[in-house]
Image: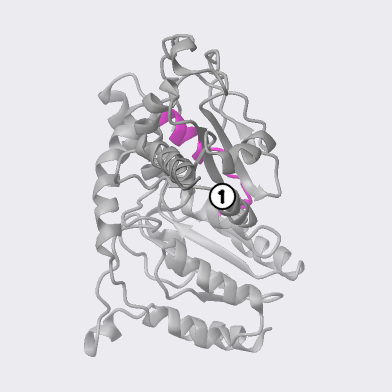
Amino acid sequence: MWNIRVIALTLAAYSTLASAAIFPKDTVVKMLDPKGFRKAMKNNETTMVAFVAPWCGHCQRMAPEYSKAALGLYPLIPTYAVDCDADANKRLCNDQGVQGFPTIKLYPRGKQLNPLTYDSGDRTASSFFYWASRRVPNHIKKIGQLDDIQQWVQESAERGLPRALLLTQEKIIPLLWTVLGNKYAGKMELASHRDRKGKSSVAMGYEAGEQKSSKVLIYAPNSTIPVRYEGINKLDSLSKFFESVIDGTADLKIVNEEAASEEFVPDEAELEIERKQEAQRIALAHGGFANFIDFEDAIKKGHNPHGAQGYPGMLGDLPKKKATGSDSKAAEPAAETREDKGQAAFAASPAEEPAPTATPTPEPLEVPVETQASEPEPASAPKDEL
């Protein structure tokens, strides 16, 4: 009896390891069990999940490409995998309608929206990356003209929610901002305005800023006076600040001062991910173009899903070391009085892609490897418009 138990435990452990082993050792893809899946679905965020089996030849060939896509999306779109061959996960896979391997599903907003199934035969990193990044629900109000900003500010103030306006010199809305808009939809309104060469910033009383820089302006509920967010423009820092804004009970002047005092301490693991992302970002973007000349032309026109992202989950490059003493005065924004008024008000207030190609015949769930049909040649990559 003891030997039987040991064998059973060994087989169970082997199944889990085999599933994880189809992905590279340094992958950012996280394996999920039913408990982890439920936890992931509780978050109001877009996630991508691959339902796989360790014996599946299609899965083994797909895993490196899926892992590359996960790296490109990290940390804005969490990417997971579930080993459907493990007994503990079979009910989960069945409940999610998995009928063949691999099955890739996108959950646009946790359990609040129905999942989408990847039905293209092109299982490449570029295809997974664009498929996921383009299907984050869009809750961002795009403001084209400078004069339209004040109109949006006044109209949105009447709806009683806190608001955040992004002034970005990028030609497209950064994926980070779209992800935040989806995460806080219904709790906070987000808008974006293209700040060409910082001209809008200057007109609003701020400095123009460096090329491709961004500014975040916060409006308290029912207020039309902006407060400039002084923290770091990265996912976790902005999320923490937005949570305080939404809470409504914190002294937001103090919260903003705390955000301004946050020192950027790069994590070595995150820096390694950044280095890999920098190289892979080019490869991912290049995958949607016929040749490198087309790709260069697209980049010059600003077609880059990540915008000017540097460190994972961040707008722009790594923050510079904060100035001290006399240097800090030179770095102060032009509209100091406007900022002071805004802080006081804050403290007082509570794209379509081409039609998918034909899907190859899915591998059956319970058929042994030796009886599976051979894999058809994948379709060629679609010519994506970035």
x, y (%) of residue 20? 39, 41
Decide: is 63 above or below 338: above
**Does the magenta-highlighted stretch encompass residue 130?**
yes
x, y (%) of residue 150? 63, 64
Q: Quadrant of residue 370?
A: top left
Q: Is residue 266 left or right of residue 129?
A: left
Decide: is 172 above or below 226: above
The magenta span reads 126-145
x, y (%) of residue 4? 48, 41
Amino acid carrying label 1: it is: Gly
Q: Which residue is mark 1?
A: 144
Q: Is residue 108 left or right of residue 237?
A: right
Say whether residue 381 is visible.
yes
**Does the magenta-highlighted stretch encompass residue 90?**
no
Q: Which of the two residues, 350 or 366, is positioned nearer the viewer here?
A: 366
Q: Which of the two residues, 99 or 270, is positioned nearer the viewer here?
A: 99
